[in-house]
Image (spheres, helix red, strand yellow):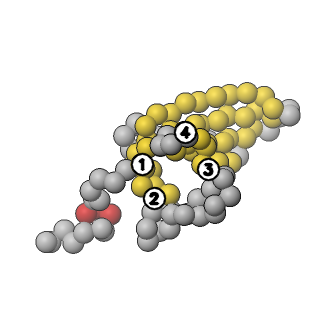
Amino acid sequence: MPDTYDLVLCDISGEHKPVAVFKSERPFMPLGVGERFDDHGWERLDGVGRIGTPEEPIRYLVFATKHAVFELGGEMTYQFCVDLQPYSGPRSPAWGHHNPAE
């Protein structure tokens, strides 16, 4: 029985609904509450396409995480659900958004 891994990203502003899902044959890296998680071009589930870009990402913070494990169609599915809240705080000079010499 093959294993599948889903990363389900939910925007908790507004309707609190899944906005993107990524699938893998390997587990996703863990995330902690408060970590930054940016959209650099996800294909959105609601059909609006990609709204974030590498030049202008949609910025989020991890609000909560949840894990679910279930069998579906003869496959074990491991879901990692991540609730994201919009973030508009300061950008870090470590990521090249400001000149650290100024």
Q: Which residue is mark 2?
A: 58
Q: Earlier in the sequence, mark 4 or mark 2?
A: 4
* Residue 41, quarter of the rendered image: bottom right
What's the amino acid at mark 3? Answer: Ala
Q: Nearer the viewer, mark 3 or mark 1?
A: 1
Q: Residue at x 30, y 68 (%)?
A: 96
- Give the percent coordinates (x, y) of residue 8: 61, 42
Q: Residue at x 68, y 28 (%)?
A: 69
Q: CA distance from mark 4 to mark 3?
A: 12 Å
CB of mark 1 within 8 Å of CB of mark 2?
yes
Given residues 57 and 17, the one toward you in this image is: 17
What's the amino acid at mark 1? Answer: Pro
CB of mark 4 within 8 Å of CB of mark 2?
no
What's the amino acid at mark 2? Answer: Ile
Given residues 40 and 17, the one toward you in this image is: 17
Q: CA distance from mark 1 to mark 2?
A: 8 Å
Q: At numbered mark 3, what does the secondary structure look like: helix, strand or loop?
A: strand
Q: Residue at x 50, y 43 (%)?
A: 14
- Give the percent coordinates (x, y) of residue 42: 58, 59
Q: Which residue is mark 1?
A: 86
